[in-house]
Amino acid sequence: MAVRVGFDEALMLYDSLDMNKLSRLATEIREKINGNKVYYNKNFHLEPSNVCIHRCTFCSYRRESDQEAGSWSMDIEQVREYCRKKYKNGETEVHIVGSVHPDRDLSYYLKVVEAVREELPDTVAIKAYTAVEIDDMTKSSGLSPKEVLKELKARGVMLLPGGGAEIFNPSVRDKICPDKTDSDRWLEIHKEAHKLGMRTNCTMLFGHIESREHRIEHLMALRELQDETGGFDAFIPLLFKPANNPLSHLGEVSIIEVLKTFAISRIVLDNIPHIKSYWPMLGKELCQMALLYGADDMDGTINDSTKIYSMAGSREQNPQMTTSDLERLAAEAGFMAVERDSFYNIIPKKS
Ligand code: SF4
């Protein structure tokens, strides 16, 4: 497909029942960009708290206060201990993301990064804080996004995760996350990060109250920013999981809808190099299937370090995989797995 697809064509493809065609079109693009490779990394997550001022209706992770059952909030010493415990197999990335805690401010988030940097070897890249968390840091400090990002970068943050984008459409956002960072602000923070030379990821939460049209609009907004800055490395379609949240009654969309969304994402986002099929959310089998619909990155070993999707009912309740497990999943789907660092440089296999 040489010509970039527009809104109408993307919608037509989405509505089509020809799954073979969608797989073929998405695979053509993934092959042009990534050949037969499927990327993975060795990583773990750090989720400093789940107590949050926001009340996103799709969220199963948040707790109202530190007193509520199931809540946690780490102090800096606990962050240090956690890093010492989780770093054990030559991980190359720590992914820091959490909630917007009512009593934490910029100085706490900077101390977290400083502690992580001190505890882990330089070979571990720090990917930290969503645009929503960064937006809150600007509010508590009175600094601009650029100033906050510079503070984070100075302490060792190298990349930003892509969370908090949800669905950009304001009418959907008003219903699912009315009080948090709006889409313009989310895009502005990523643009500032790109201007500072920081690579970032981007996401879309799908499968709740939004329509296919809303999803395509969302993808087009990301494509437009990528045309301007080139700073996104990977796009992650995040599947809404219905357990334990106010939108539980919606249930989960079909596997066909999930695979179509991967294919359409790969086809529309022709300028973002990687599409990630995030296995702690999808489960291993669906993650593997998404590789046949344009995805080229499975994320990492995780080491049982994230609760966001397990609290929402993912079948992966204690997510962890060895590199051999990841390599096997890729091989079974007909791809060659390669280990990458956080910047998609391939790490040669030790013989
Ligand atoms: S999705 Fe994030 S911002 Fe929204 S309630 Fe959950 S933890 Fe808070």
Image (cartoon, rainbow, N blue to C red):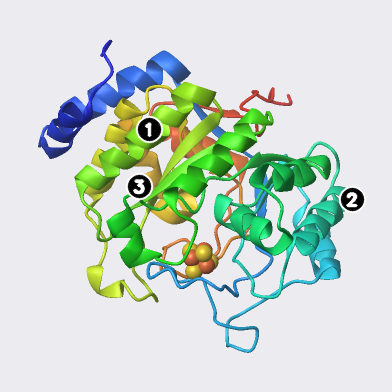
Residue 32 drawn at (x, y percent): 40, 14
Ligand 1 within 8 angstroms of badge 3 C-beta:
no
Residue at which label 2 appears: 118
Residue at which label 3 appears: 286
Determine whether the residue tagged by mark 2 lies in a helix, strand or loop.
helix
Of residues 84 and 271, the one nearer the viewer is 271
Residue 121 drawn at (x, y percent): 86, 42
Ligand 1 within 8 angstroms of badge 1 C-beta:
no
Q: Residue at x 24, y 39 (%)?
A: 260
Residue 83 drawn at (x, y percent): 79, 57
In the rendered image, the residue lying farthest to the front is: 142
Q: Amino acid at mark 3?
A: Leu
Q: Is residue 272 above or below residue 305?
A: above
Of residues 44 and 165, the one nearer the viewer is 165
Of residues 315 and 225, the one nearer the viewer is 225
Q: Nearer the viewer, mark 1 or mark 2?
A: 2
